[in-house]
Amino acid sequence: MAATDRFLLFLLAVSLAVAAVSSHNITDILDGYPEYSLYNSYLSQTKVCDEINSRSTVTCLVLTNGAMSSLVSNLSLADVKNALRLLTLLDYYDTKKLHSLSDGSELTTTLYQTTGDASGNMGHVNITNLRGGKVGFASAAPGSKFQATYTKSVKQEPYNLSVLEVSDPITFPGLFNSPSAVSTNLTTLLEKAGCKQFARLIVSSGVIKMYQAAMDKALTLFAPNDDAFQAKDLPDLSKLTSAELVTLLQYHALPQYAPKASLKTIKGNIQTLASTGAGKYDLSVVAKGDDVSMDTGVDKSRVASTVLDDTPTVIHTVDGVLLPPELFGRAPSPAPAPGPASDVPAASPAPEGSSSPAHSPKAAGKKKRKAKSPSHSPPAPPADTPGMAPADAPAGEEAADKAVKKNGATAVDTNVAATVVSAAALLAASFL
């Protein structure tokens, strides 16, 4: 290999190594600034930190403990979450850029705009150079005042992350009208979201009481839409026993708060309300860009929308019923690739005068597959309604599994970075 090619490969490997080890973590950064501890705490509680960390370019407008305390005094966590999103700009701004805006003013997008809850351009923020060298931030709503002003620069990682302190939050009328889990009728919410069949099942089975009890601690619910129950390849759910139906519905909920951005960060298996330990009745996440799907081992169901996000409860709709392999069997493995022709034994010649074809070893070993029983209409719920989880319904959690999951993402990132750095070192040695 030519010296020039080696050098280019070396530079590429070093660049990849730097990228692997320099991804930002906003909560870790703010841990070193006690004056923003309340802001940082709410980033974690609302999981806005995961949304920030998933962005390659972002500016965080942080509030001191005093300003943050005034903001949250009379707000639900859902409203606090939207306030934090509106303080998160999806562009890089440092002191120099703030004071050199084109025409002295600029409209920029925030995390709040990406939620789909913002009406029109209400998820944008107006940045303007004011008199006396001040820089103001205001809602894009007509007539909004510049309540927030730039105070100082806190931390920069050009041109990926910038942390700037501002004097006050940015608000507008209607920002703090988020639906609350406490005041929400769960079945009504699900019906409005197009999940009427799922709502009927959780009521008739009594599982709604389990969901409501979990909402006080932490709950993530995956509600299949009505089209999911019309799928041609869906097994006949009316043939499930009462205990099996309860387990199936428990399988659609996690005992943790996991909005969409947080689901993307989860590695390995996730315990559901049906999990028994040893990996039974667990789910896993498949994330590709902005798309997130839940993988059961039998099928995958895409997270279609979020209909409620009020820490510690979040309700997602999914486009398929989650089918646990413990109840419905695993998806068939792909057939192995055929070997060389010489490895396949030759078929015996047919006896002379026989009209039937020769019997092949492959045909002899083939088993008849059992056909699934399709359901072309929403299944009727069982007649008997359990008042509580059946004795054989899975319950409980494994502390060891939690520890593995908590550290899984960090371990993966560290291993990737170490591998890339090692490759860079080997290429450097080759070049030298």
Image: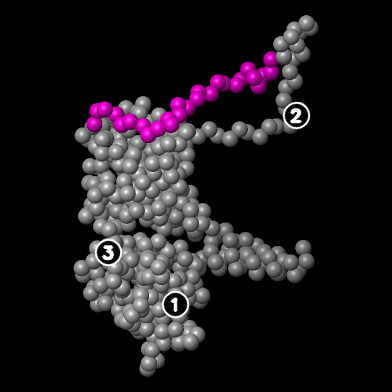
**Which residue is rendered at x = 38% and y = 75% of the image?**
140
Tell me the quadrant of the picture where the N terminus can be found: bottom right
Number of the label disc, if any, that sits on residue 177? 3
Q: CA–CA distance between discs 3 and 2?
A: 69 Å
Q: Secondary structure at mark 2?
A: helix
Quarter assignment of residue 251: top left
- In the image, residue 95 sits, relative to residue 172, either above or below, namely below
Q: Position of residue 225 (x, y in %)?
A: 39, 44
**Which residue is rendered at x = 27% and y = 66% of the image?**
176
Number of the label disc, if any, that sits on residue 237? none
Q: Position of 385 compared to 357: left or right? A: left
Verify whether residue 383 appears in magenta.
yes
Q: Position of 1 compared to 170: left or right? A: right
Q: Nearer the viewer, residue 375 or 260?
A: 375
- The residue at which mark 2 appears reads as 341
Q: CA–CA distance between discs 1 and 3?
A: 24 Å
Write down the region rendered in magenta. 358-385
Q: Mark 2 against mark 1, which lies toward the viewer?
A: 1
- The residue at which mark 1 appears reads as 107
Q: Hey, what amino acid is under mark 3?
A: Asn
